[in-house]
Image (spheres, grey):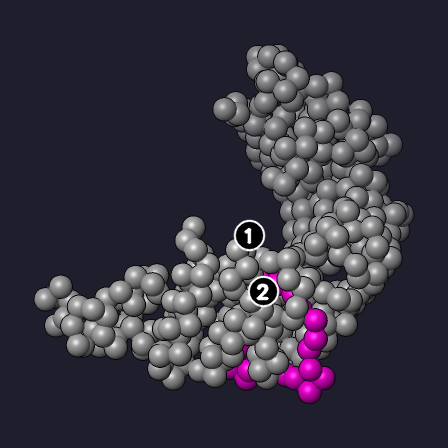
Amino acid sequence: MDNLSRLPDELLVRILSLVPTKVVVSTSILSKRWKFLWMSLPKLEFVDRDESLLVLKDFVNKNLPLHRAPVIQSFLLSLYESREKNIKPEDIRQWVEIAVSRHLRELDVSYSSDNKENMVPNSLFACKSLVVLKLRFLTLMDVPSTACLPSLKTLLLELVVYEDQKPFEALLSICPVLEDLEVWFREDESIQEFTINVPSLRKLCLHVSYYWSSLERYEIDTPCLEYLELADWSDSPCLVKNMPKLEKAHVDVVSFAVKNVIGSVTSVKHLTVCSEDVYGDGIVFDQLEHLKLCICKDDSSNVLARFLKDSPNLRVLVISQLDLHADLKTNEMGFWNQPSSVPECLLSSLQILNWEGYFGRPQDRDIAVYILRNARHLRTATFWADTNEHDVPNLEMIKGLTLSSRASSTCELVFVEDS
């Protein structure tokens, strides 16, 4: 402790900012110098760690008003109310207001409660210094019409409770420089339609629940978007406007019935996709170089055939099952219908094939053999063999592929047995 005490205050504060706030406050009993040192911390963290929420509330009420740093870099509140009702929405509003008054740059609030009262103070929406805002589970009922978050670049809204779409859309409208948006809607959401219209947005992650029965339609208008992650299991009509700057997309949808979704990501170079249906005609992915296809659905073999046909410059093909789908135990991919003509990408560009979770079933083997026989520039074909799911012996898998002819004389065949 003597060695620490010799350090200048500025360095001590930097060290203490790496320690949970409650632990830092406890150091105030060490000496007169340490008594006030924690009050200059640029990062504050108040987390419910299996203790009484009443104890935590008293701790925050006692210590937060004493904090005197001119700028709070980060303020974290993580509270999960169960049977206790000791923390009220007015407590959350009061604590956030104090943080906002210190030129707050990053706010992260998680508050799970049955209380549907508005939990966000109006002062938050006028915070000129705020760069990062993360809200989880709490209720957002109103955003003032005169509000503005001129510096906000990152926004996370996870399972937030809305009365209707107005607070959600109003919040987006007051963020003129927003670049990164992530939204997870609740399963029992009551919103019927919504629009994401953010001209400055570069990255969007949107998750729409399968159980969101009231959703009728939604629209995405983000002309500067570079990365899109869309997980929509609701099968609701969606209008995705043109995104000419999009380079990377992750599309996990129930159906391609809305042709507009896949038709709006044709400029991407890197695409991850999972869908039950084959998309429509007239779509070409002439920039696509890296495709990762999830094969957990019945029609996955036809979706693969379509992408091979429509991706003339494809260099890397990954066949796998998305991590989120690993527990679904579906993977009932149908039998391979060989294309009438060899896709251009197999003749001229495909260099790498990675098949993660290769079962060795007839339909799997037919696809693998077709690619090996026709991919003229293939350098490596790697198969992670799963011998347990369908009881196909590893040796049989290897024989079925090694004995197949290959269009590329330099292609290296690699087998890896999944543990």
**Element assignment for label 1:** loop
Q: Is residue 43 above or below residue 338?
A: below
Q: Amino acid at mark 1?
A: Ser
Q: Residue at x 51, y 62 (%)?
A: 86
Q: Residue at x 77, y 47 (%)?
A: 211
Q: Is residue 128 magenta?
A: yes
- In this orientation, which residue lies closer to the viewer: 363 or 35? 35
Q: Position of residue 210 (x, y in %)?
A: 76, 46
Q: Position of residue 148 (x, y in %)?
A: 63, 83
Task: Please identify the quarter of the rendering in which residue 28 is found.
Answer: bottom left
Q: Is residue 131 magenta?
A: yes
Q: Main secondary structure of the magenta part?
A: loop
10 Å neighbourhood of mark 1: few (<14), some, or many (≥20)?
few
Residue designated by label 2: 135
Please state, as top left, top right, bottom left or bottom right, where the N terminus lies in the image.
Answer: bottom left
Q: Position of residue 292 (x, y in %)?
A: 66, 42
Q: Position of residue 156 (x, y in %)?
A: 60, 64
What is the number of the mark on residue 393?
none
Task: Please identify the quarter of the rendering in which residue 249 is found.
Answer: bottom right
Q: Residue at x 61, y 63 (%)?
A: 138
* Residue 79 shows up from this direction: yes
- In this orientation, which residue lies closer to the viewer: 4 or 330? 4
10 Å neighbourhood of mark 2: few (<14), some, or many (≥20)?
many
- In this orientation, which residue lies closer to the viewer: 284 or 221? 221
Q: Earlier in the sequence, mark 1 or mark 2?
A: 1
Q: Amino acid at mark 2?
A: Leu
Between marks 1 and 2 in the image, the one whose residue lies nearer the viewer: 1
Magenta-colored span: 127-151
Horizontal side of 206 relative to 303 (left or right) equals left
Horizontal side of 208 relative to 47 (left or right) equals right
Residue designated by label 1: 82
Q: Residue at x 75, y 66 (%)?
A: 163
